[in-house]
């Protein structure tokens, strides 16, 4: 980072000492609790044809469909369709039949279904469902950036009713509130960073580009498409992405944070 940006980041941190990130914020729900909630959600869909939780599951799959419809991932809709065939249509459809419909192998079908289950758990309980165990501050920023769309797409509070156990419900509620708090702070920082990159008194062309690339990453646009739009190599885009992560981490975390 340039000296000027380092100074800007330090000033930003000084003004937000009570709202800086720490590693503890991302480790408040154990992996075991997350896996238990995942089993509960999966079992809820397995009981859909028996009429269990049908209205709540219909609403959840509807919100998931909205998320999928805006994904740039070419396989996202196939994953969604595999899940629908497996759990949501009136008659049971086996994995081999689903594979034939989608033109993939059976193992791919199960990978699709597992991915859908994981993403819908994120819609239910937020960041905690991503089982975040980051190694460094930059990685946390990467997770928040790459997962921005789904973290902001939390399903309605009705999903809490799918988790009947006291511990599971408490984990879901805690995860949802934590996600709102974290993403609120992250949004504020992104806005401040964007203002820095567009400051007419200090900005340069590459800073403007970095800010634009960050916004595209937040919208889920993959680096290959960004590189094509800018007419440059993917390595250049990745370099800007990593620099954005370093800069945002310098704004979000205390310099002496325990998450190094």
Image (cartoon, grey):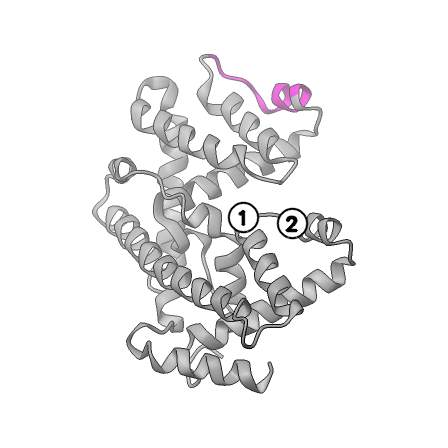
Nearest the viewer among 20 and 33 is 20
Q: Which image quadrant is residue 5 in?
A: bottom right
**Nearest the camera: 52 or 2?**
2
The spot of residue 22 in percent (x, y) is: 38, 73
Instruction: Report the residue marked by disc 2.
Output: 222
Q: Residue at x 47, y 47 (%)?
A: 149
Question: Along the horizontal axis of the image, is 160 left or right of 144?
Answer: left
Image location (x, y in percent) of residue 198: 54, 66
- In the image, the segment drawn in magenta is 91-101
Find numbered disc 2 in the image and state the secondary structure of the residue it sits on: loop
Q: Is residue 232 above or below residue 219?
A: below
112 part of magenta stretch: no
Q: Residue furthest left?
A: 166
Viewer-proximal residue, 33 or 143? 143
Q: Residue furthest top?
A: 91
Could you tell me how far apart the alpha carbons at marks 2 and 1 are, in whole angstroms? 9 Å
Q: Which residue is mark 1?
A: 219
Eyeballing the image, is 197 above or below 48? Answer: below
Q: Is residue 113 visible?
A: yes
Considering depth in this image, is 100 or 75 the residue closer to the camera?
Answer: 75
Q: Position of residue 131 (x, y in %)?
A: 45, 57
Looking at the rendering, which quadrant does residue 246 occupy?
A: bottom right
Chief SS of the magenta region: helix
**From the viewer's perspective, is 40 left or right of 192?**
left
């Amino acid at each position: 980072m340039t000296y000027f940006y380092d100074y800007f980041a330090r000033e930003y941190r000084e003004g937000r000492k009570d709202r800086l990130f720490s590693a503890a914020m991302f480790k408040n729900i154990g992996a075991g609790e997350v896996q238990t909630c995942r089993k509960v959600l999966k079992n809820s869909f397995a009981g859909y044809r028996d009429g269990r939780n049908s209205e709540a599951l219909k609403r959840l799959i509807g919100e998931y469909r909205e998320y999928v419809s805006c994904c740039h991932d070419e396989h996202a809709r196939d994953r969604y369709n595999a899940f629908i065939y497996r759990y949501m249509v009136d008659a049971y459809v086996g994995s081999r039949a689903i594979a034939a419909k989608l033109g993939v192998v059976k193992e791919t079908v199960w990978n699709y279904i597992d991915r859908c289950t994981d993403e819908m758990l994120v819609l239910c309980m937020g960041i905690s469902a991503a089982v975040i165990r980051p190694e460094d501050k930059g990685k946390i920023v990467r997770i928040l950036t790459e997962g921005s769309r789904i973290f902001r797409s939390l399903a309605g509070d009705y999903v809490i009713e799918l988790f009947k156990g006291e511990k599971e419900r408490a984990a879901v509620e805690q995860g949802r509130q934590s996600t709102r708090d974290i993403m609120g702070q992250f949004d504020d920082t992104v806005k401040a960073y964007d203002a820095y990159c567009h400051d007419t008194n200090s900005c340069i062309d590459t800073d403007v580009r970095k800010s634009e690339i960050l916004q595209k990453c937040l919208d889920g646009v993959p680096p290959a498409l960004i590189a094509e739009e800018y007419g440059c190599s993917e390595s250049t885009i990745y370099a800007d992405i990593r620099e954005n992560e370093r800069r945002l981490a310098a704004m979000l975390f205390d310099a002496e944070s325990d998450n190094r």
